[in-house]
């Protein structure tokens, strides 16, 4: 019944979607890794970035990607300030629970402000290449999805390189692995955690711009994203960027492929089934996830 | 606690009925005696609950504008039965529990003379139950799903041309009239899991199936679906002649762009709701030509009262009315016709007289002449619109068409 070309097309679309998931989930896994913060406002910041991209593109007529020049540093700064002045004041013993409440409030505030400023009307960026696609064998690859996949790839590689090869990256990893030991060797763990949080939020800026290329956006859209993203980082192993990327690609492909036999409604339950299975079988996550054992 | 509340409500209702029947005599009497004298009596208070915040806030506010325009036109013209009309509008925050409480309090505590319906199937169904318990006439502007009229209530009337499954009737007539070898052969349906969106799409799907069109894709997606590319891939792979979207706004835009990206070109494309949205043309990059959509209203309609409605709406709200405004205005016109004909507007026996009158008569409105069956389903049909040269135009039925239907549709 299902043709080979449809399977191939779905596989391509699934991979592209997985790339976007990976980008959107990368920040979340960082926050968890750094200091056990459950950051419910991450997807709200993604939608905020998407709105800024839409607004920038509508106001200037320029490509929405250019808005990243402003949003990436701005979001980095916001992340840093949020960590230093809000999250770091929560007591470590109750950090996980209290951060849920705090970031839930922040998500509601962002959603409310978006609604106030831009109204509840759904917006979509009108791009000259919005409907274009590239032919690959029997499949079609939408140009906007190629761009967002490329953005995801570049951002994740950059993030990985920063964590792996820079002095700051080593300090951040040390902070994640053992804060006390890191302090003993002279790392300012508070400042490092702040930068780490900023880095996570900067990925939300890139993710928001990528999302705005291929979806209509509205203020409450972030609630639809936070569930799947949480599932991805748990499956991938909290704190692991490669883990999040692999889990995102895998779940993206599975979701799209499962739509063929099951339809869209059941296919989206794959995230929750994967979450459930992970917590039952391997609570620290299937990929990477060495750090998560502490949680 | 609950017993006390119940007693209080019962007492309040009894009181309301008593007061209403007294007031009815005076109201009716004055109306007859003074024959349209202005402001000589208490105003007729109409209770309405609307989703002014929450999920349905945008259309809810449209409905509010329509009701306000109607009240202004009525009051400027000397009122109903010579009495001014006063709207008492509550905000139910798109919450089905709040809408029930709102109508309970409007009817029992505030003792309003009449009630009119809220927006959306999800709110109209519980609201119509309350109205039925109190025996109130319930004209509603915005619940088209077939299920609304299957609760056995005789007090509900839908103030629009047709319920959802009948929205595409004119299009089906058009396709049936085509020469057999030119008719579409295959169709794909993708509908949101929502009674209204599915109602419209399945009306067309089932009609096409009866004409011998093969349904090659039939998908349902959840209301929160944001990524339409997988559904689009299935449609593109099947390459049907007709694509039917049982859509709201964002899913229609996402789906059309995903279909374009996969280079699928249907010969006919019909989407509910989205194409009439002012943002639609820009959202899909102007490639709208040939897209079809059913609509219950057009500002260009030549029905006698429409000109007055459009002018009043522009004066009061500074914009042309949309379908939401028109449906609310129509609800007002239906209620007004019944009240004027029966000669009363208060709780009690009068309500039954109003209900009976509407079951036996037709009313001229801005969406045409409406009559109803015993369950409150209107007897009309929706107009079919199509984008022609970037502008939306009525293409069916032929007698009110502004342009000719384009088939097959131009490439998008």
Image (tube, rainbow, N blue to C red):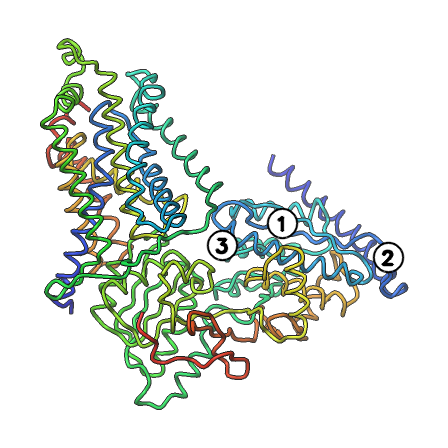
Vertical side of A142 occupied by B299: above or below? below
Label 1 and label 2: CA atoms lie apart by 25 Å
- Mark sitting on residue B103: 1
For the N terminus of chain B, the quadrant is: top right
User: In the drawing, does residue B126 fall left or right of residue A126?
Assistant: right
Label 3 and label 2: CA atoms lie apart by 37 Å
Report the chain holding disc 3: B
The residue positioned farthest toward the right in the image shown:
B33
Q: Residues within 10 Å of mark 1 (few under 14, many from 20)?
A: many
Percent of width and height locating residue B49: 61, 50
Report the chain holding disc 1: B
Percent of width and height locating residue A123: 40, 51
Task: Choose between A189 and B59: the one closer to the eye.
Answer: A189
Vertical side of A165 occupied by A121: above or below? below
- Mark sitting on residue B122: 3
Task: Choose between A232 and A208: the one closer to the eye.
Answer: A208
Residue B364, by quadrant, is: bottom right
Percent of width and height locating residue A14: 18, 53
- Mark closest to the chain's N terminus, 3 or 2: 2
Report the chain holding disc 2: B
Helix, strand or loop at mark 2: helix
- Mark closest to the chain's N terminus, 1 or 2: 2
Figure label count: 3
Q: Are marks 1 and 3 in contact (CB under 8 Å)?
A: no
- Mark sitting on residue B26: 2
User: In the drawing, does residue B122 fall left or right of residue A221?
Assistant: right
For the C terminus of chain B, the quadrant is: bottom left
Helix, strand or loop at mark 3: helix
Helix, strand or loop at mark 1: helix
């Amino acid at each position: 019944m299902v043709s080979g070309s449809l399977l191939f097309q779905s596989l391509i679309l699934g991979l592209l979607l997985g790339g976007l998931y990976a980008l959107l989930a990368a920040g979340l896994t960082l926050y968890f890794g750094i200091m056990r913060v459950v950051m419910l406002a991450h997807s709200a910041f993604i939608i905020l970035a998407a709105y800024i991209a839409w607004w920038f593109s509508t106001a200037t007529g320029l490509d929405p990607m250019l808005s990243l020049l402003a949003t990436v540093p701005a979001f980095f700064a916001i992340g840093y300030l949020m960590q230093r002045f809000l999250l770091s004041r929560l007591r470590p013993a109750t950090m996980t629970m209290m951060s849920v409440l705090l970031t839930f409030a922040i998500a509601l505030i962002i959603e409310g402000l978006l609604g106030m400023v831009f109204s509840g009307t759904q917006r979509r960026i009108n791009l000259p290449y919005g409907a274009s696609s590239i032919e690959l064998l029997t499949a079609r690859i939408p140009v906007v999805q190629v761009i967002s996949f490329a953005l995801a790839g570049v951002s994740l590689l950059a993030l990985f390189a920063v964590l792996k090869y820079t002095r700051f990256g080593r300090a951040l990893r040390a902070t994640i692995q053992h804060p006390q030991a890191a302090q003993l060797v002279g790392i300012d763990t508070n400042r490092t955690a702040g930068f780490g949080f900023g880095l996570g939020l900067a990925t939300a800026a890139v993710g928001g711009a990528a999302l705005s290329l291929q979806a209509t956006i509205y203020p409450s859209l972030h609630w639809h994203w936070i569930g799947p993203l949480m599932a991805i980082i748990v499956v991938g192993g909290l704190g692991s960027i490669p883990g999040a990327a692999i889990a995102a690609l895998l779940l993206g492909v599975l979701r799209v492929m499962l739509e063929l036999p099951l339809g869209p409604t059941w296919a989206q339950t794959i995230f929750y089934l994967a979450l459930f299975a992970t917590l039952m079988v391997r609570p620290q996550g299937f990929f990477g996830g060495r750090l998560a054992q502490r949680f | 606690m609950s017993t006390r509340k119940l007693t209080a409500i019962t007492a309040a209702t009894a009181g309301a009925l008593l007061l209403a029947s007294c007031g009815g005599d005076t109201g009716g009497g004055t109306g007859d005696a003074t024959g349209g004298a202005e402001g000589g009596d208490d105003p007729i208070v109409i209770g309405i609950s609307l989703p002014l915040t929450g999920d349905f806030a945008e259309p809810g506010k449209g409905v509010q504008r329509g009701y306000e325009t109607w009240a202004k036109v009525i009051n400027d013209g000397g009122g109903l039965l010579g009495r001014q009309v006063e709207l008492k509008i509550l905000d139910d925050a798109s919450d089905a529990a709040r809408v029930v409480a709102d109508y309970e309090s409007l009817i029992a505590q505030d003792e309003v003379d009449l009630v009119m319906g809220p927006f959306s199937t999800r709110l109209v169904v519980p609201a119509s139950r309350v109205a039925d318990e109190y025996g109130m006439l319930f004209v509603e502007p915005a619940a088209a799903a077939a299920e609304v009229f299957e609760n056995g209530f005789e007090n509900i009337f839908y103030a629009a041309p047709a319920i959802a499954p009948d929205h595409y009737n004119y299009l089906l007539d058009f396709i049936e009239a085509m020469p057999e070898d030119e008719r579409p052969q295959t169709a794909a349906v993708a509908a949101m899991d929502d009674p209204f969106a599915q109602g419209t799409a399945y009306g067309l799907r089932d009609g096409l199936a009866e004409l011998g069109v093969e349904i090659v894709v039939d998908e349902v997606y959840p209301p929160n679906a944001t990524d339409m590319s997988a559904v689009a891939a299935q449609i593109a792979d099947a390459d049907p002649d007709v694509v039917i979207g049982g859509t709201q706004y964002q899913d229609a835009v996402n789906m059309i762009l995903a279909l374009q990206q996969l280079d699928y070109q249907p010969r006919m494309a019909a989407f509910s709701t989205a194409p009439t949205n002012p943002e639609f043309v820009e959202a899909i990059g102007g490639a709208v030509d040939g897209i079809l959509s059913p609509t219950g209203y057009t500002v260009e309609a030549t029905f006698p009262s429409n000109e007055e409605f459009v002018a009043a709406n522009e004066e009061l709200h500074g914009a042309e009315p949309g379908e939401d405004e028109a449906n609310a205005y129509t609800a007002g016109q239906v209620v007004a016709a019944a009240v004027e004909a029966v000669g009363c507007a208060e709780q009690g026996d009068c309500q039954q007289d109003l209900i009976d009158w509407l079951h036996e008569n037709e009313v001229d409105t801005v969406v045409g002449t409406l009559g109803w069956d015993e369950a409150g389903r209107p007897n009309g049909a929706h107009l079919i619109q199509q984008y022609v040269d970037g502008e939306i135009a009525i293409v069916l039925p032929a007698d009110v068409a502004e342009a000719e239907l384009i088939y097959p549709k131009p490439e998008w």
